[in-house]
Image: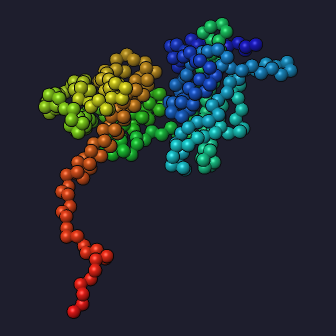
């Protein structure tokens, strides 16, 4: 017997359409991603069959759902990615909970000391179909907070000023301010797109995949149109940096306008996540690969050591003493 639910339409901050979830395990997998890397206050609406559980005892009936038993994320104490286990005291989450958000905790299974706390709101709502379960899951807090620092490698490549702007983009995205996050992200792209073109051109040269367009680099870099620069870099990117035939510049092509002309905060957050992944993939892979290529060329360009006079073997007989 199901408890009376609410409608998706009356939940504040809801996506336009709930996501279809295939199974209870699929739901737990999606919740794991939200807990580890999802932004705060960005509600996840879902619907599907047999996702929630009914518990009957005496004259009372309760509805609940389960959280993922384990998460995989970075542990600052171990300085490595580890498995995290939900604390034993954390039972299922019962719907109909009144009051402040519910607290849950995970601990690192490797060191057994580092803990991660989350505060969540989880509501049961009417499914889109009669026999389906529906819910809305929102992460409203966590401690330690979600990391908002670019990687050391990326920060070094961006430089102090642009790394600061990129951090502001990450901070805004972490608190679901998608429009502001995109605005800061666009400024970083504008400031660093010429450096990105240089990295792509160097990679194309190393891969011997330069084209006639390579000669137009300086003209393109002098252009005032961001989209033209991104389109140029897309054509120049070597094939081995387009895994599966997917060009990461496709995700950056609309950064000049997308999200800044009437898009919702939710859509801006989706775009930000896509752009962030493509941008970091490009900058980090190009930087590392080009550095390795430079070192390889340097080593291969060294003259071979000249053959010296072979030392006298210890097995050779000594000259007879006079």
Residue drawn at (23%, 48%) of the image: 297
Residue drawn at (53%, 27%) of the image: 41
Q: Position of residue 128 (x, y in %)?
A: 60, 9
Rendered-image quadrant of the N terminus = top right
Q: Position of residue 186 (x, y in %)?
A: 32, 29
Point out the residue furthest to the right here: 58
Q: Taking 38 as reference, is 262 left or right?
A: left
Rendered-image quadrant of the C terminus = bottom left
Task: Count numbered badges in the picture.
Answer: 0
Q: Taking 12 as reference, is 168 left or right?
A: left
Point out the residue furthest to the bottom here: 322
Q: Taking 10 as reference, is 50 left or right?
A: right
Residue 289 or 16: which is nearer the viewer?
289
Q: Position of residue 27 (x, y in %)?
A: 60, 23
Residue 4 or 322: which is nearer the viewer?
322
Q: Position of residue 289 (x, y in %)?
A: 31, 41
Q: Does residue 11 appear in the picture of this structure?
A: no
Q: Is residue 304 above or below residue 229?
A: below
Q: Does residue 130 appear in the picture of this structure?
A: yes
Residue drawn at (19%, 70%) of the image: 309
Residue 149 position by quadrant: top left
Residue drawn at (67%, 27%) of the image: 66
């Amino acid at each position: 017997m199901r408890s009376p639910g609410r409608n998706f339409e009356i939940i504040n901050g809801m996506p336009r359409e709930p996501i279809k979830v295939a199974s209870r395990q699929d739901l737990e997998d999606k919740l794991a991603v939200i807990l580890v890397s999802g932004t705060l206050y960005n509600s996840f609406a879902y619907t599907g069959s047999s996702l929630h559980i009914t518990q009957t005892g005496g004259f009372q009936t309760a509805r609940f759902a389960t959280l993922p038993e384990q998460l995989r994320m970075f542990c600052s104490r171990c300085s490595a990615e580890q498995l995290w286990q939900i604390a034993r005291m954390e039972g299922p989450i019962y719907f109909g909970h009144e009051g402040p958000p519910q607290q849950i905790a995970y601990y690192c299974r490797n060191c057994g000391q580092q803990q991660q706390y989350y505060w969540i709101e989880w509501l049961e709502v009417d499914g889109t179909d009669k026999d389906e379960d529906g819910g809305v899951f929102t992460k409203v807090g966590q401690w330690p907070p979600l990391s908002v620092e670019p990687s050391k490698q990326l920060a070094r490549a961006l430089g102090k000023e642009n790394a600061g702007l990129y951090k502001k983009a990450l901070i805004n995205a972490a608190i679901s301010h998608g429009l502001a996050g995109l605005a800061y992200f666009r400024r970083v792209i504008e400031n660093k797109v010429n450096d990105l073109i240089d990295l792509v051109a160097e990679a194309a040269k190393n891969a011997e995949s330069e084209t006639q367009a390579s000669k137009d680099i300086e003209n393109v870099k002098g252009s005032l149109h961001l989209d033209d620069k991104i389109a140029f870099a897309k054509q120049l990117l070597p094939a081995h940096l387009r895994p599966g035939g997917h060009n990461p510049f496709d995700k950056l092509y609309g950064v000049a306008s997308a999200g800044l002309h009437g898009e919702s905060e939710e859509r801006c957050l989706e775009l930000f996540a896509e752009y962030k992944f493509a941008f970091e993939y490009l900058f980090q892979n190009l930087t590392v690969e080009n550095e390795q290529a430079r070192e390889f060329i340097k080593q291969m360009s060294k003259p071979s050591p000249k053959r010296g006079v072979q030392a006298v073997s210890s097995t050779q007989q000594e000259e007879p003493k006079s």
